[in-house]
């Protein structure tokens, strides 16, 4: 074989790490790699990924970049909430900017504030018209840009195979 050899780094990062995790059918590692990849553009301080249980109108945490504060397996009831209607039922992106928005839409606003987080982007992950869950990024800055929202959307799209693999 002629030409340049392609070498693989011993510890893949970015898209390569995501691809490798999916090649190994390791959804948990894929979510961790997606978080790390998104961090390069978002600079977020917390990433969580939640599976949506439509029958119970609950979200159950599959992944957290801070498992001490937000452990995997934790769940939240979203029935009858404006956030639940907006993100889970209407399948629309939610952007919360500033402490007032966090306080208005999240029961755990004190924990969010204590972590120094001031804004959030929640992306519904939808396949075939069905919301499978959300990918959530919380930032230490009070505002987000359109570029931040685009980066968060892309990260959520990268998480789709993990959601499909983890379906019950």
Image: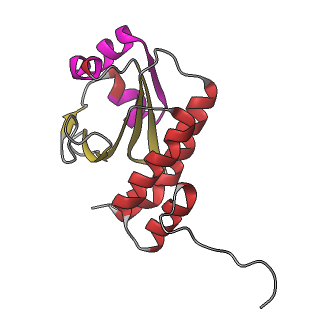
Magenta highlight range: 84-113
For the N terminus, the image quarter is: bottom right
In this picture, is 157 found above or below 26?
above
Residue 142 image position (x, y, % from top left): 46, 14
What's the residue at 60%, 35% (across, down)? Answer: 150
Report which quarter residue 154 is drawn in.
top right
Residue 98 image position (x, y, % from top left): 42, 12
Q: Could you say which is closer to the camera, residue 113 or residue 158? A: 113
Residue at the limit of the structure toward the top, as seen here: 100
Residue at the limit of the structure toward the right, as seen here: 3
Residue 23 image position (x, y, % from top left): 47, 73
Report which quarter residue 99 is drawn in.
top left
What's the residue at 58%, 72% (across, down)? Answer: 8
In this rendering, would 127 be left or right of 3? left
Q: How many marks?
A: 0
Q: Is residue 60 magenta?
A: no
In this picture, is 1 found above or below 16?
below
Report which quarter residue 110 is drawn in.
top left
In this rendering, would 135 be left or right of 19? left
Q: Could you say which is closer to the camera, residue 167 or residue 30? A: 30
In this picture, is 142 found above or below 36?
above
Q: Could you say which is closer to the camera, residue 110 or residue 80? A: 110
What's the residue at 42%, 74% (across, down)? Answer: 24
- What colouring style does the render use? secondary structure
For the C terminus, the image quarter is: bottom left
What's the residue at 52%, 53% (across, down)? Answer: 158
| Dominant secondary structure, magenta | helix
In this rendering, would 27 be left or right of 129? left
Q: Is residue 85 magenta?
A: yes
């Amino acid at each position: 074989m002629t030409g340049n050899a392609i070498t693989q780094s011993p510890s893949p990062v970015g898209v390569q790490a995501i691809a490798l995790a999916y090649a190994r059918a390791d959804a948990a590692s894929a979510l961790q790699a997606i978080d790390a990849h998104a961090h390069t553009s978002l600079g977020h301080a917390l990433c969580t990924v939640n599976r949506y249980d439509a029958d119970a109108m609950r979200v159950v945490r599959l992944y957290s970049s801070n498992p001490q504060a937000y452990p995997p397996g934790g769940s939240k009831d979203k029935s009858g909430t404006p956030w639940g209607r907006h993100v889970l039922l209407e399948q629309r992106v939610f952007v919360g900017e500033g402490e007032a928005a966090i306080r208005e839409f999240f029961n755990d606003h004190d924990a969010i504030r204590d972590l120094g987080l001031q804004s959030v982007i929640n992306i519904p992950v939808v396949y075939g018209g069905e919301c499978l869950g959300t990918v959530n990024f919380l930032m230490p800055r009070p505002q987000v840009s359109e570029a931040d929202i685009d980066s968060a959307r892309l990260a959520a799209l990268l998480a789709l195979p993990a959601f499909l693999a983890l379906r019950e």
